[in-house]
Amino acid sequence: MDFQVVVLAGGFSKTLVPLVSKEVPKALLPVANRPVLSYVLELLEQNNLKDLIVVVESESAALLIGGWISSAYVDRLHVEVAAVPEEIGTAGALRAIDHHLTASDILVVSGDLVCDVPPGVVAATHRRHDAVVTAMLCSNPVSGSTESGSSGVKDKAKKRYNIIGLDPTKQFLLHVAAGVEVEKDVRVQKSILRAVGQMDIRADLMDAHMYAFKRSVLQEVLNQKEAFQSLRRDVLPYLVRSQLRSELLLNGVQSEENGNDKDASQNPKIVLSQLLANASTPSFHELQHALGPNGFSLSPRKTHKCCVYIASNSNYCVRLNTIQAFSDINRDVIGDASHLSGYSFSAQNNIIDPSAVLGSKTTVGPQCMLGEGSQMGDKCSVKKSVIGRHCRIGSNVKIVNSIVMNHVTIGDGCSIQGSVVCSNVQLLERVVLKDCQVGAGFVVIAGSEHKGESLAKKEK
Amino acid sequence: MDPRRYSRVIDPKVRQVGFCPRSGQVQNQSGPTGPSTSPPVSDISPSSNSLSPVMIPPPRHPSDAASRAVNVPAAATTPLRPRRPSFDDPNNNSSSTEQLVVSSYNPDESVLGTSPPFSGIGDDRDGDAESEFSDNSVNWIRQNDSGRFPLSLAPDGRFDSAAAKEKQSKKPQVGSRKERGGGQTAEVRNDLPSESKPLKEKTSKAARRALQEAQRAVKAAAKAAGGNKSKAASLSAHEQTDKAVKLPLQRKDDGPVTSSAAVSERRGGERPPEKDRKKDAPAPRMQFDDKNRVEKAKKRSVVKQTEARNRVELFRHLPQYEHGTQLPDLESKFFQLDPMHPSIYKVGLQYLAGDIRGGNARCVAMLQAFSEAIKDYSTPPEKTLTRDLTAKVNNFVSFLIECRPLSISMGNAIRFLKSRIAKLPITLSEAEAKSSLCSDIERFINEKIVIAEKVIVEHAVTKIQDGDVLLTYGSSAVVEMVILHAHKLGKQFRVVIVDSRPRFEGQALLRKLVKIGVSCTYTHINAVSYIMREVTRVFLGAASVFSNGTVYSRVGTACVAMVAHAFHVPVLVCCEAYKFHERVLLDSICSNELGDPDAISKVPGRMDINSLHDGTNKENLQHLNLMYDATPPDYISMIVTEYGMIPTTSVPVIVREYGREHLLI
């Protein structure tokens, strides 16, 4: 279908510290004991997209991710892993792999996306409208469960929301503002507003970071605007802003715009394009042009279209870009959105690996997951939690709403609630954690109580 | 030799003849049903047979006919017409004479196999036309039945089939004696079965009994004798019985065997031609009330289609799907449909989403997509381009049909493309073949659509004069061009744009016209009868024109044309000739398209009405959103094509004369 897929897998994200460490880049964070990147790759594989470019920030992360991909998808996918320097942003990453892009359209997917929306819908919408960019929007995830998640986290998450302006048919993107700018006034372009007549401004939509770009336009923008760093913050708003006074060469017809109005009727190509334009339901782009001051001239329009695809509420679509999102996704993947996990659930609606050992009177509730080789002592209780591989858990331990990664040792009498415990962590006896994140390899001393803290080893 | 043409030529003469003074006697001639009446008939018909159809009508020489008619013994005249008294008066009643005339010249028609004469009579004066029409048609049909007694028909149409049979059995000798060309052969054919049948039946009972008895005897003999002897005996006995029963029995015996053999033979013999026929004939349109076929089609289909549940009874044969389910499904499969070329896919999506509408635009978009696909095509190894590409195109077309039923214009374009592919010389290399196809497609678009539109505009503009009030319905691209061109020429006129729900296509046209300064009136179709009194010309677009002159167009067109007709306003239909089709369409039921039923049930901005239709799947509520309707030719004054301005009756001429050209250009 002439689409090229670029997966932006990121590197060692700052926002996810302490979950992310030197050993675990963001793309390899486990979601239901699988790296988060695997969700994207499998979604693409299901949709018959097997030639991928995975862009990773920093060499070391590229090594880790490349190693994992080649071991997991050796004969299933044809993946090229490209390493780009850190902190160049998504636009910079695309700029760096510019020469690899050949297809007419590029599908850019974020590696931290966990969703079941087939990328085909975005691509199809893109093609149907012949758009320059098509973004997928999804409704904001219900952040934080009712039991956990402090209000502070929620406020932070709210700030990330976008203000998005749509036309009444909900097909075109008219305005994009990142959450930070919302604090100020929302500035809407008059020209666009005049052309469309009506704009829906929505704050309940989230940019899912799955874009379809027209390659020629993307490359042009990236080359012209050296300062652009991020697709979401720079490139997309730029394209949306300039959609009615496009300076881009969309195709051949537009390039020869030096006033050939007179012989336009003689040129069959223009007559044809006009014929097609007349018959199709005019989007505001054409209308704007038709109502222009220069009467009924046939000068080629200088507009481009920015489209959106809005995922329906029945689809699951979340990005793993905050710690809160990390625990939410983990909870959902083994809970509500269990079809994403790829596991088959037991009758009790949980997954317990056969090699896991449970002590007497230990209960594992529904929506739980217990990785292979893990051992649990007596009288433990696990609710709505994910426990990784080869963990050793003592007796009388309570784990609720938490994520425990691989090779974690938990002493007797611990209570873990709403927390994330990374790999190789040691919790000694009677530790109480509530809404905490424990970085990899950390040792929590016996009897300590933590609430809403982030514990990590000091980086040397 | 198109029969239609002749009938058209004949008609005026027939009418002319109707006024001949001595018709009463001619009437008498036709009346008698007795066997003796045939001589005059035979006298007339051979002469008419020899004449070319244009010259036929015997009544052209009324005196001649009448003199012959005088010879006829009138004693046996039976027909009692209600209007009979008037016949005695030779000076008047043209209508009755007309009927008579029709009946008298019909034999010729039947021999030639031409179209029924009432097509001409239908054009007659409005007054009597109806009754005459019906009478004549009855006569005509009967005549066909009886075959060779055209003149024995009573003009009043009372002539019943029983009488016909009677005559048939009586008449053979008369007919053969008189040697009446075509009529005779038919008769001979008739005779054979009628004689053989009763014979067979009579003998069969006796034969059966005889056979039974013989068999019993054989059995008894076999029991008595036993062994080999019995066999011989039985054989001989069988022979004997056979002889006793004579031929009929043999026939009887052989009957089943031979018939089965014949059947098998027929099967064996007929199968290949049937297949061929299937290949030759265009595939019959899918009837969507045929559950089995729908199921099969579903399995094949790319787009997941959920049939709409509550469909209107009369329109179940048309495809109707739950709107709103197809598009997301097709979109989600974007990357999974490998064989589909992206450009085809894009066009399909646009059809499905309604982004491209209008016959020309859809056709152009499709052709351009085909051209793209052909450019990217490469013949797989060990396959020939012609065959493989045809299969590919078929594949594309079926995909597009799934997205939206094809329009007639698209069908014609596809036919053109396929014929071009089929006619590619084998010597061409792949690149050459591809480029020739692409240039063919480009030429088709250019000649058949772009230039054709320009020529149509040139023609149509001559019909617009200063001070005219034009009315148009919806938004037709060609009509729009006509109006723009007329405006450019500086003609002073006004435009009434009639529009209708749910699409309000006229608004786009209105916007354009208002912008360039044409004075416009915009109204909805509800008000068409009011606005029509100030209109001087009606310009309409068409999706297709069928060979009987029926115009197939956006639903509502027929209504506008009829109202215009009632107000004596000329109706001009602008249509490119590539949209003509040789099919005959009589109503808008057989072939039509169903739109989204929700489109008509929901009125934007009227919550009070919309709330009524919340449960759209109510059992007793069915929405019918027809997309097209058929305008009968009677309501259309003129069709403007690139070949000139023609009456509806000339459509078949265009189809015949230029239809080949579509494929050849």
Image (cartoon, rainbow, N blue to C red):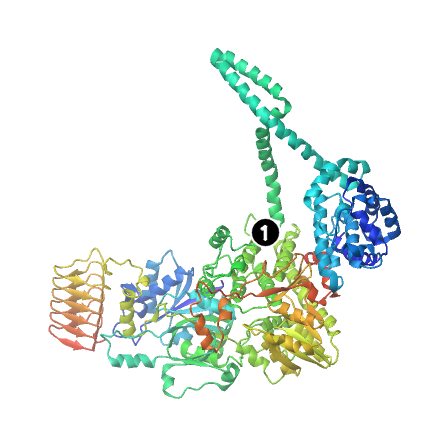
Quadrant including the C terminus of chain B:
bottom right
Q: Quadrant of residue B325?
A: bottom left
Horizontal relation, residue B273 to residue A200: left or right: right
Q: Is residue A258 visible?
A: no
Expressed as whole percent of the image width and height from the top left, the position of residue B318 reads 54, 58
Percent x, y of residue A335: 27, 65
Residue A458 as seen in the image, left or right of residue B401: left
Q: In the image, is residue B635 above or below residue B295?
A: below
Q: Looking at the picture, which amino acid does disc 1 mark?
A: Ala
Name the residue that disc number 1 marks.
B283
Image-quadrant location for residue B149: top right
Residue A202 picture location, percent across and down: 40, 79
Q: Nearer the viewer, residue B317 or A164?
A: B317
B120 in relation to A327, above or below: above
Q: Residue at x 27, y 79 (%)?
A: A153
Which of B539/B217 is in front? B217
